[in-house]
Image (cartoon, grey):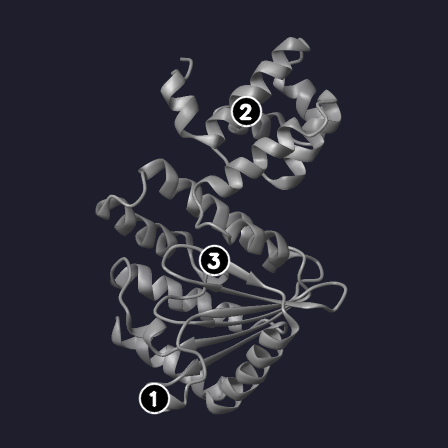
Amino acid sequence: MQSSESDLASSPLVRFGAELRRSRRAMRWSQTELGRRMGFSNAMVSYVERAKKPVTHNFAVRADEVFGTGGTFYELWRRYSRASLLEGFAEFAEAEARCRRLRTFELGVIPGLFQTPAYAAALEAASVRRGSISQDQADERVAFLVQRQQLLEQKAPPTIHAVLDQSCLLRPIGGRAVMRAQFDHLESLADRSNITVQVAPFELAEQRPFMLPVVLLTLPDRSVVGYAESQLRGYLERGRAPITAWEEDYDQLQVESLSTVASLAMIRAVRKDLE
């Protein structure tokens, strides 16, 4: 059954799939033939055409190369990746995908790169219930998060240091089962050699340097950019003076937070209370 015009207008993912299907049919190619030319399976082509899987940057670029469309699919991918996101976040995500080192401080929720799909879906479901976003947008946000998390599975992943405010552990998201699975996943990630997890305890009180979440990204050219959010949008900071100040504050935060051993012990204790 063909998608209605209203569906096409409401979902960038559907628009991408429709354009891919239109272009393939214009060339009289099967999904198998297109997949062979692009280097993807026919199943992946089918999923994208039916808007059942998120579109990756590489898929969009290969589609442009195969069809000779000069950036049409890349632009659709950019619109898709940005449509359901806080203003400014897509620019951050592009920088994040290239970073060689990532330092983050999070408040109230588990950092996105560490979230399980069920935990992320529970957060987005709350936004749907409030009427802030549609269910389609919620699904696209979770799909985009899963796509971002591919960063952790690279052959040479970045070094990641995450400091979680204690509130991240104590705020129940999605129910006890979701939280148990989330803590298990967090502990598994913390066991990786490139990932360090610390907890900033409530006892830091006013000594905690950051009052809002912040991310510092070291890029391949060794430059550092920062990211922070307001209620309405995200900001990618490149100024040398504020970045230096953030780095100094982050160094202090690492020193003042619990050790990695004590942090994992706290995570396990909270996890045990959920049994």
Indicate which disc residue 205 carries: 1
Q: Nearer the viewer, mark 1 or mark 2?
A: 1
Q: Name the spot of residue 22 as percent of width and height, x first.
A: 58, 14
Q: Which residue is mark 2?
A: 46
Q: Name the spot of residue 123 as percent of width and height, x first.
A: 32, 54
Where 166 falls versus 217 (above or below)? below
Which amino acid, mark 1?
A: Ala
Q: Which residue is rendered at x = 55% and y = 52% of the image?
A: 148
Q: Which residue is mark 3?
A: 234
Which amino acid, mark 3?
A: Gly
Q: Name the spot of residue 111 as percent of width and height, x first.
A: 45, 65
Q: Is residue 240 left or right of residue 130?
A: right
Residue, far right: 221
User: 77 or 120: which is nearer to us?
Assistant: 77
Number of other residues with Cα within 10 Å of mark 3, as a class: few under 14, some 14 to 19, many 20 or more: some
Q: Which residue is rendered at x = 38% and y = 40% of the image?
A: 137
Compare marks 1 and 2 and give the one earlier in the sequence. Answer: 2
The residue tagged with tag 2: helix, strand or loop?
Answer: helix
User: 86 or 93: which is nearer to us?
Assistant: 86
| CB atoms of marks 3 and 1 within 8 Å | no
Q: Quadrant of the C terminus?
A: bottom left
User: CA–CA distance between discs 3 and 2?
Assistant: 34 Å
Which amino acid, mark 2?
A: Ser
Q: Nearer the viewer, mark 3 or mark 1?
A: 3
Number of other residues with Cα within 10 Å of mark 2, as a class: few under 14, some 14 to 19, many 20 or more: some
The residue tagged with tag 3: helix, strand or loop?
Answer: strand
Q: Name the spot of residue 262 as percent of width and height, x first.
A: 44, 88
Picture quadrant where residue 237 is located: bottom right
